[in-house]
Amino acid sequence: MRTLLAFVLVVLAALLQATFNPQIRVLGGEPNLVFLLVLAWAARGTFQEAVLLAFIGGICIDLLSAGPLGLTTLALLPVIYAVDTVREQLFGFGFPLVLLFTALGTIVVNAILFVGASIAGFSLPPVAAFAYTILPTMVYNFVGILPTYIVVRRLARRFAE
């Protein structure tokens, strides 16, 4: 039941990200809803569920955008592996670590998306992409991770498998 609910949430997040997020773009950045959901689920759920969400959410975003198919999934996977590796090494994976992974993950995901888009033929200046896209997106992600984490934590407790 929990996996089905996560599937529905990530598809809704991808739809909102593709349709609503461009309307609230400020200073070139926008919240990455699928990234936030996948990161919160990786911190609270199982590794397999997080990989499944990254795959489904990444494919949905790529189908709804002009980006290469599979690039967003490829960008989300290193963050999930890093979260899982750190979670195995530590006794607890609390919200301060989620904030750290939000910052680092935003940079990693956007860097992979930038390189992939450059390889696919989109011309993006690197300094401008970092200053005008990644930094505002990081601010949005910092604001959005708390409610996302709270919702995922409650769902994980409610539908414990």
Image (spheres, rainbow, N blue to C red):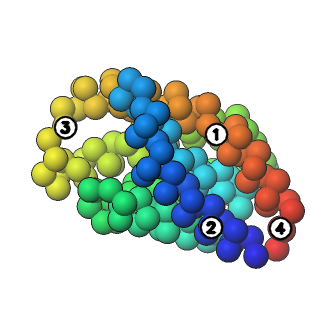
Mark 1 or mark 4, earlier in chain: 1
- Residue 81 appears in view: no
Please identify, in this view, whether the residue under mark 3 or under mark 2 is nearer the observer.
Answer: 2
* Residue at image mark 1: 145
Other residues around mark 4 within 10 Å, as few (<14) / some (14–19) / many (≥20): few
Which amino acid, mark 3? Leu
Secondary element at image label 1: helix
Q: Residue at x 62, y 37 (%)?
A: 144
Please, is residue 6 above or below residue 82 in the view? below
The span from disc 3 to disc 4 (Cα, nearest Å) is: 43 Å
Other residues around mark 1 within 10 Å, as few (<14) / some (14–19) / many (≥20): many
The span from disc 4 to disc 2 (Cα, nearest Å) is: 14 Å
Which amino acid, mark 2? Val
Q: Residue at x 49, y 62 (%)?
A: 57
The span from disc 1 to disc 3 (Cα, nearest Å) is: 27 Å
State the image coordinates of residue 130 (x, y, percent, origin top left).
32, 29
* Residue at image mark 4: 159
Q: Residue at x 43, y 64 (%)?
A: 60
State the image coordinates of residue 142 (x, y, percent, origin top left).
59, 32
